[in-house]
Image: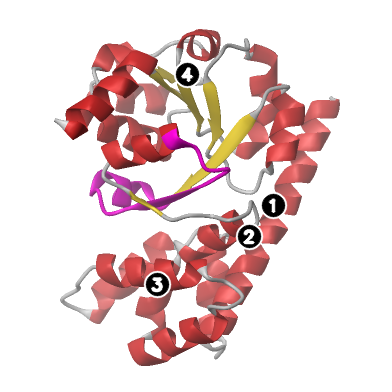
Amino acid sequence: MIKKDKIEFLNDRKVGIVGCGHLGQSIALSLIKNGLKRETLFLSSRGNPKTQSRLQALGLAQNLKTNQEIFQNAGIILITIRPQDLPELKKTMVPGKGLIVSCMAGVPISLINTALNAPVCRMMFSGPDTIEQESGVASMFPEHEDLKLLLRCMNLTHIRSKSENDLDVFTAGVCMPAAILKAGHRDEAQKAIYEIADEYPLFSELYQWAVSVLPHFQTQKEQNQYIEKMVTKGGVTEAIINSLCSGASFDAALRAGVSRTKQISKEIQRSILSGLQD
C-alpha cells in the first residue's frame, strides 16, 4: 500500500524526462515497470531516427512531448541531455512550476541556474544497466524529499551527498565495479578504501555497493570484455583503469578518477559558456 501511495504521488505530479538517451530510457522503463501510468510520463527527443526507433520498440513513442509541454505540465523534470546541449535547451524552455533536476555530469548548479534562469537540483545515477536491474545507486544535491521518493519507487539506493563536490566523487565511485575487477586483489582494494575514507566518505558506501553488484564471469576473456565495455575513451573509468594498468594503487586510481571528473567538468563548462554566448 505504501509503494502504491508513492507511485500515485508521482502520477499526480507527472514526470518528464528531457532527453531520451540510454539513461533517460532506463529511468522511463523503470518508472513504468514500477507502476507509473504511461499517460503521466512525458519524454522529449531531438528526433534522432535511431532514438525514435528504440522508443518505438520500447513502446515509449506515444509518450513523446515537446520540451515546452514537459516544462509546463510535469511536476518533476529530469534533464538527461548531453551537457553540451544545454544552450539549445535554453532556447526551447518554457518555465513552469515543476522541480527541475539536472542529471548532467560535470555541470554545476550555478551554471544551470544561469543557463535556464530557474532553480534546479542535481541528481546522478549509476549506469543504465544497474537502473534496469534495480541494483543501482543515485545521489542528489541538495536533498529533496520528492526525489528520494522517486528513487524508492525505482528501487534504487540513495547515497547522500553533503555537498555538490560529493557528486564528483560519486561519478568516479560508480566506476568501481570495473576497477575492482581490474585490480584483482579485493583485500588490497578494501584496504585502500579505508585509507581514503576520511577524505572521500562516499567511497566507502560505493565500494560496498560495487562489490554487491559485481557480475560473475566464466572466463578471464569475458571479464576483460566487460571492463572494456565500461570504458569510454577520455572518460572517468578509462582514467581509473589506465592508472591501475600503470601500477598505481587502488586509492591512487580512484583519485585519478576524481581528478578526471573535475577536468571533464571544466571542459564541459567552457563548452556551455561558449554556447550561451553564441
Residue in the foreground of this view, choosing between 257 and 226: 257
Q: Which residue is mark 2?
A: 261
Location of residue 233 with respect to 95 vertically, above or below: below
Question: How far apart are labels 4 and 3 at the CA level?
Answer: 38 Å
Q: Position of residue 68 (x, y in %)?
A: 55, 9
Q: Amino acid at mark 2?
A: Thr
Location of the N terminus (image quadrant)? top left
Q: Is residue 139 magenta?
A: yes
- Give the mark, 4 or 2, whose residue is nearer the N terminus: 4
Question: How far apart are labels 1 and 3 at the CA level?
Answer: 23 Å
Q: Is residue 199 magenta?
A: no
- Give the mark, 3 or 2, whose residue is nearer the N terminus: 3
Location of residue 207 with respect to 12 vertically, above or below: below
The residue positioned 48% from the left and 65% from the top of the image is 173
Q: Which residue is mark 3?
A: 207
Give the magenta range. 126-145
Q: Which residue is mark 4?
A: 47
Q: Which residue is mark 1?
A: 265
SS label for mark 1 = helix
Q: Find residue 184 and report its image quarter.
A: bottom left
Question: How far apart are labels 3 and 2 at the CA level?
Answer: 18 Å
The residue positioned 42% from the left and 91% from the top of the image is 188
- Give the mark, 4 or 3, whose residue is nearer the N terminus: 4
